[in-house]
Amino acid sequence: MKIDFRNKVAVITGASSGIGKALSIELAERGAKVVLAARNTDALDNVKSHINSKGGDAYIFKCDVSNENNCKELIEASITKYNKIDILINNAGISMRALFDDVDISVIKKLMDVNFWGTVYCTKYALPYIQKTKGSITGVSSIAGYHGLPARTGYSASKYAMHGFLETIRVENLYKDVHVLIAAPGFTESNVRFSALTADGSNQGESPREEGKMMTSEEVANIIVKAIYKRKREVVMSSVGKTAVFLKKFVPAFLDKMFYKAMAKEPNSPLK
């Protein structure tokens, strides 16, 4: 299937690394003009250079998605540069690993600010332009948005909130031809795990999972781009995720135990 995004403009948050970087490169290779947003401008410059060296068209904008004014300025800069927006991908996100008993409330607030409010802010200011182009809005979520994951209270809460928000945006724009996709990768080789917050808000610094058993960011990006092209409602990417969504409908208590057991096996797990 030939997927062509020529003459499309895509804004991607969290574009400096991992899934966001891979999405930016994938879309650019398929002809889209891409706006790369993140806090790390040096990393964004590297992504831009890679894209431009391949004949693509990339523009960078330093943005902290937890800051509403930054998000507004991101959208305004995108319109000034390219005069339209066809695709918004809300990818910026952070994770956590700590029991709710132990976690500082500020950690959960920070996750909500980035994962949920970042999606709200960017969508709010991009929506009028996406309505004009009958474009797409994507939220990069997780299986944590379908079932609560132990030691990830803030992460699950933020992804559940994202789901509810984007589903409502979809319904409100039902007759405006705005496409809304919720994409849930499995465990992915992505920097989000290394920067996951611990109970006191410090970075985890290492992944508790084996890289070799994870999806690559490039695999995830390819699936999401295809789903945007086909205007799918949602895509759950891993077999574990698909099984969990199915089991939740019929045996949620069993799923609770399975998730507890799986997370307890992680190295240095806070679960006893």
Image (cartoon, rainbow, N blue to C red):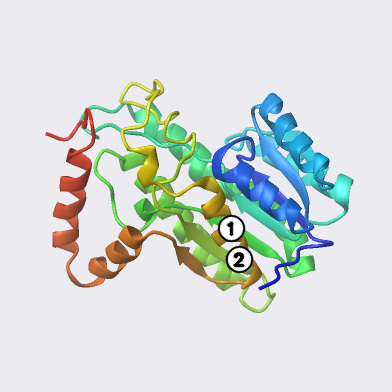
| Residue under label 2 | 226
Q: Is residue 92 rendered to the left or right of residue 95?
A: right
Tell me the residue at 65%/27% (across/down): 40
* Along the viewing direction, whichever of 88 and 20 lies nearer the viewer: 20
Image quarter of the C terminus = top left
Tell me the residue at 58%/49% (across/down): 120
* Along the viewing direction, whichever of 106 and 181 lies nearer the viewer: 181
Q: Is 168 rendered above or below residue 39?
A: below
The amino acid pointed to by label 1 is Asn
In the image as oriented, which residue stretches furthest toward the front? 212
The amino acid pointed to by label 2 is Lys
Q: Secondary structure at mark 2?
A: helix
Tell me the residue at 24%/43% (across/down): 150
| Residue under label 1 | 222
The percent coordinates of residue 160 (x first, y second) are 40, 54
The percent coordinates of residue 102 (x first, y second) are 23, 27
The percent coordinates of residue 154 (x first, y second) are 36, 40
Are circles 1 and 2 on residues that touch, CB within 8 Å? yes
Image quarter of the N terminus = bottom right
Q: Secondary structure at mark 1?
A: helix
Q: CA distance from mark 1 to mark 2?
A: 6 Å
The percent coordinates of residue 246 (x first, y second) are 28, 70
